[in-house]
Amino acid sequence: MMGIDRYRNNIKSLTHFLFAGCLLASVSLSAQQTKVLQHGAHRVGKRTDAEMATWRGYGLGQFIHWGVYSLFGGELNGNYYNGAAEWIRSWKDMPHGVYDSAYKQFNPASFNATQWAKMAKQMGVRYVTFTTKHHDGFCLWPSKYTDYTIANSPYKKDIVKQVVDAYSKEGIDVYLYFSVMDWHNPDWRYDLKTKEDSAAFERFKLFTKNQLTELLQQYPQTKGLWFDGTWDNSWKKSGAFTDTLEQYLKTLHPGLIIGSRFRADEFGNRHVDANGVLMGDYEQGWERKIPKTYADVHGNDWDCVMTIPENGWGYQKKWLGHWKSTNEILEMTAQCVSLGGNFVLNFGPRADGTFRPEEVTIAKEAGDWMKINSAAIYNCEYTGWEKQDWGYYTKKTGENKVYMIVFNVPVSGSLKIKPAKNTLVDKAYLLTAPGKNLSLEKLDYGASFIHVSSTGYKQPFVIVLETKEGSEKSDEQKAKT
Ligand code: K80
């Protein structure tokens, strides 16, 4: 039974793992501390291959949650709730029979994958993560391992294929979201307490492996898999299987990118193994929250997935409460890139395949900004410079270029900069006016001011700093205290 209590339990266990994501122990691997693990991390530090370098440089991504839940739009008996609309099947007043037959009405007459991909392209996203199967178990591709698929809806056509093809054609890399937890499959278990549970879960593991193999074989353009619904004891007790499966998928599809939500070690640790080392290609715990400092990311690759409303991923007819403005979204993007991560914004299309006007506007406005300023977002990384109150620094990977993405101009109009050690600023100019150098007023301790107008901004703007190696020769007196 998937009642509200089950839902609460899941929230509790998920909260645990999201916290774990924040608290990744910065364990130093001294000989005594290191446990010998068969199914722990197989690598310390970041991946160094070309596929991962591409991933690292994306800067901005799109998430799409679309499925049977989109038909309900978070409405149950005429009421709307703040809960996540894609979880509506688990809400206490939702009869499962009603939900489980709703796919017979899933017929997105206005769905046009090319239009979706063009909107995403216009927005400037460089990768998309698309829900192939959410917790409800409904497959947007014609999986041969279950009848609960798009093939048996009135729409019939393969949606995953259309999305993969259309986005790939626009040059946007495609990642497939896949929920391991599956409320439709009778063999799914939250825990393995009896022999019968274990037998059922053996069948479920094979089903999962088959579906994943099917996805990678049918959509070979796929760059990575984005797993969800992996926090329950049944999966945590399957550490060896999850490890073997991950390696199998990567053999099947070299270069495949899989985040830290997928597997567990043999002790049931998730995200990081018993030695505190990340398992997976990037840290996947930053859901609807952003690290504050570089120390928070523990030297790992990471991305942040974010909703536009406060919570909820699938289509919600009525957004209750705050939803983010384009400037807030741009600020989150800048913040993520400044700390070496990517920012991924979620969209929840309606069941007919159209996007709500708020999402269309945000995509358009963010895209207009990206058209001018994407140099400060794409292929950029953490600078190591001391953060200042006006906004965020990013650095072009492999180049001597630092970007200041300015959100908060102080009333003085004076923007303070303080390069990292052994770095000097050679030139400063607005990204939009490369020929016109801005003057730098030298301050003590290697800092400078750039003076700009203190008023009149509607959007963040970017200043480029060309840098060189060296340190300031100065005769300034350090204060004696
Ligand atoms: C599952 C469970 C909780 C408590 C919060 C979010 C989630 C799922 N992960 C997001 C990426 C969505 O898919 C959401 O349904």
Image (cartoon, rainbow, N blue to C red):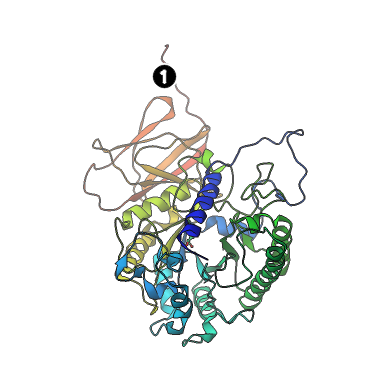
Q: State whether label 1 is within 8 Å of ligand 1.
A: no
Instruction: Please say if 145 is above or below 26.
Output: below
Where residue 148 appears, as percent x and y from the top left, is 55, 79
In this image, 186 relative to 306: left or right?
right
Residue that label 1 marks = 476
396 or 83: which is nearer to us? Answer: 83
Where residue 383 appears, as percent x and y from the top left, is 50, 42
476 or 83: which is nearer to us? Answer: 83
Instruction: Please say if 452 is above or below 349.
Output: above
19 or 306: which is nearer to us? Answer: 19
The residue shown at (69%, 41%) is 275
Where residue 481 appears, as percent x and y from the top left, is 42, 11
Residue 466 in sight from this viewpoint: yes
Where residue 451 appears, as percent x and y from the top left, is 29, 38
The residue shown at (44%, 38%) is 425
Give the residue type at disc 1.
Answer: Glu
